[in-house]
Amino acid sequence: MGRDEVLKKVKKGSMGSMILGLILFTIPFMVVILMLAMGKAKGNVVLIVILCLIAVGGAFMTVYFMKVMLNPMNSSFVKKHPEILDMADELFANIIYKDNALIFSSRIIGYAQDPRQLSYTDEVFLIYVYIHKTNGVTDMKMLKVETARNTIQIPVMGQKDEFINNLIGQIVSQCRYARVGYNDDSLAYLQQMKAIWRRDQESKKQQGA
């Protein structure tokens, strides 16, 4: 059930990448063909080689993401994070809260718009608002949730502080080890908790061996 949502998102994302791959293949290939037909290859060898390399890269990209579209289990994301599928099944079978930004059960929390971004509640360590500016103008605003395994990113551009604070409050209420704010102390805490988590994971592997 939940894994179907994850695989659907992987498949949807691969479609855009496949189209990009087709563009990267088709345009350079057509330019090279046109240059050869017009007799402009001489003196443009370096450019032709570059265009051919781009076209080859685009071809590989197209083939790879086509395979992912046909079978999302082929994606590097799923292969790197196989645990996400079981987590998604558990989450969607035991939802206790869901809105446009958050979804969580008693053990798992995630970004409601992207089921690939999940974490166990006990593995959430830090929450803060990230703002990026270009020429003094804010062009990105994200609520970042730092976990033992990854970073959950929730877009909050254009949202009021009340909305963002409400999200933070909900996450904190579900995640007992979460701290709020980006500073030297919280970053040190994050690294400390990740180190403890890694040691626990290694200990579990040794016990299971």
Image: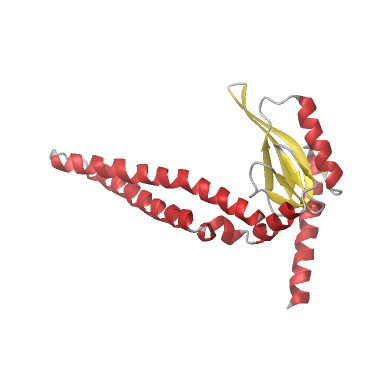
- In which quadrant is the C terminus drawn? bottom right
* Residue 168 visible in image: yes
Q: Does the rendering let one see residue 148?
A: no
Q: How many marks?
A: 0
Along the viewing direction, whichever of 110 and 90 lies nearer the viewer: 90
Residue pictured at 65% horizontal, 58% vertical: 85
Left or right of 44 on screen, residue 75? right
Q: Position of residue 140 (x, y in %)?
A: 62, 30
The residue under the point 58% across, 58% down is 78
Residue placed furthest toward the bottom: 209
Q: Position of residue 79 (x, y in %)?
A: 57, 61
Q: Residue at 16% of width from left, 39% of height from top?
A: 40
Please give left or right for residue 173 compared with residue 135 in the image.
Answer: right
- In this rendered view, identify the residue nearer to me: 196 or 115: 115
- Residue 133 pos. (x, y %): 62, 26
* Residue that appears at 84% across and 46% down: 174
Residue 112's image quarter? top right
- Quadrant of the image occupied by residue 48: top left
- Quick one: 32 or 21, which is closer to the camera? 21
Q: Position of residue 139 (x, y in %)?
A: 60, 26
For this view, does 145 lie left or right of residue 135?
right
Foreground: 146 or 1?
1
Image quarter hosting the N terminus: bottom right
The colour scheme used here is: secondary structure
